[in-house]
Image (cartoon, rainbow, N blue to C red):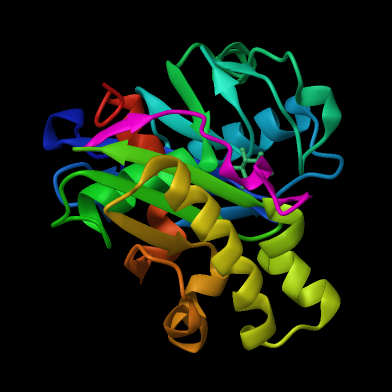
Amino acid sequence: MTAQVPSPAANHGFGIDVGGSGVKGGIVDLGTGQLVGERFKLATPRPSTPDAVAKTIAAVVAHFGWTGPLGVTYPGVVTDGIVRTAANIDDSWIGTNATEVYRTALGGQPVTVLNDADAAGLAEERFGAGRDQTGVVVLLTFGTGIGSAVIHNGVLLPNTEFGHLEVDGKEAEHRAASSVKEHKGWTYERWTKEVTKVLVAVENAVWPDLIIAGGGISRKADKWVPLLTNRTPVVAAALQNTAGIVGAAMAAHGDGTG
Ligand code: BGC
């Protein structure tokens, strides 16, 4: 069934979050950061090549019958629509003009492609855990890797890659992604020691006013955020599984992207 298409005049946008297991989309009220209706998810194709992901995105858009600008996240660096890195996705993405591939798959609809953590950061800063905060907000997502977003007074500094900072001789995401906790069978206490090291490296580099902890493991934030011993206040992400969709829709409308 195709959902009803809202009028663009109603300040609605459309976002798609491309993750390791699912491609999720929804219509977003850009005034409130809420989804208008349901979130729709299809499995991420394997291998997750550009053409395969583009087909899946087209199917998500078709489900809603959405026409008009839309934003799509990508789990790596994207500059001017072109993919630069592929840490946890198929290598064939590197050098791909993602904006063009998606636009073609969608029959010419304008598409904005941005980093997944940047999208989540935009949404959290505006509508979620950072909404009353001024100054520098850093969002870190803990999942398969570690993603980062830096937002200063509502404007994103795109493509920070704190997950790839070297911390004590090891890449941050190899030290403290939630996948490392799972893989090693660590307790929250053990894992949080590694997370603290990463947060200290980040806060010594950019001195944020607030750090927002995102990613699936932020749902269990009460089990581990209180154990952190870094300097900057850390709060759990509030929007959970809609942040990427909302932030992508915001970026497609130039909200928070300067
Ligand atoms: C990528 C980031 C991405 C993060 C979460 C990292 O490996 O380099 O760009 O935001 O994973 O998907």
User: Residue 136 vs residue 52: left or right?
Assistant: left
Quarter occupied by the C terminus: top left
Q: Is residue 157 visible in the rendered structure shown here?
A: yes
- Ligand 1 falls in quadrant: top right
In depth, the one of 115 and 197 nearer the eye is: 197
Q: Residue at x 70, y 88 (%)?
A: 187
Whether residue 38 is visible:
no
Q: Is residue 162 magenta?
A: yes
Residue 157 located within the stretch drawn in magenta = yes
Residue 96 image point, x, y percent: 71, 15
**Residue 130 position in % (x across, y down):** 24, 56
Residue extent of the magenta highlight: 154-171
Q: Is residue 139 above or below residue 110?
A: below
56, 125: nearer the viewer: 125
Q: Is residue 200 above or below residue 147?
A: below
Where is residue 168? Give x, y as percent: 72, 54
